[in-house]
Amino acid sequence: MRNPDAREEQYGGDRRHTCDSDRETKGTLLGVTDLIGSPKSVARAREYVRQRLGAGHPALENVTLLVSELVTNAVIHSDSRNGGRVTLALVDGYDFIHADVADEGSESVPQVSTDMFAEGGRGLFLVEAISSRWGIYTDCAGRTVWFQVGYQRDDIFCCPRQ
């Protein structure tokens, strides 16, 4: 019998079943926001990251770029498009930023595109290239793509904005 908390999780093409306790991230919750499944939400997600991390955060540019890519994927390719819900969560893990972008899932499975000449499809390629860790998991509520971007803790000279 399958654990009701189990979900299918994918790391760079490798799938396995995990439980919530397998995927624990410790740190400070910077915030969670619900966005409407619309292209306008991509700019809102970028602004949310800038507000939560603060202008001086060493991971700001990379986290902003990757969140932008994942929210774009969610509002274009998932069942959240056309007004559904996309949720963005940010955690400061003390030497990395962890981000979750959750949507309502879809029939297709997100894949990293290796075609550098394609018009689109490079979002997960960037996530794979820039993040220190990333993955995808699906459960009854939808799909979440997450990533972690590392940074040097001593580089921070100000606290995140609340």
Image (cartoon, rainbow, N blue to C red):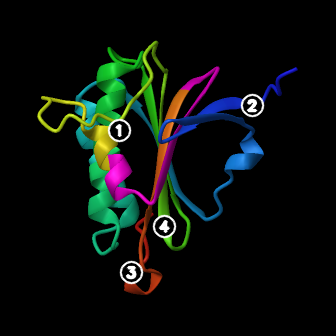
Quadrant of residue 26 within the rendered picture: bottom right
Disc with the residue nearer the chain's start (3 vs 1): 1
- Secondary structure of residue under mark 2: loop
Residue under circle 4?
A: 96
Q: What is the C-alpha distance between the residues marked 1 and 4?
A: 18 Å
Q: Residue at x 52, y 34 (%)?
A: 144
What residue range appears in magenta? 127-142
Q: Secondary structure at mark 1?
A: helix
Residue 107 part of the magenta segment: no
- Residue 45: tell me if it is visible: no
Among numbered discs 3 and 2, the one appearing first in the sequence = 2
Mark 3 to mark 1: distance in Å?
Answer: 27 Å
Q: Nearer the viewer, mark 3 or mark 2?
A: 2
Q: Amino acid at mark 3?
A: Cys
Comes first in the chain, label 3 or label 4: 4
Q: Position of residue 54 (x, y in %)?
A: 34, 67
- What residue is shown at x 32% (from left), y 30% (from top)? 73
Which class describes the residues within 10 Å of circle 2: few (<14), some (14-19), or many (20+)? some
Q: CA distance from mark 2 to mark 1?
A: 23 Å
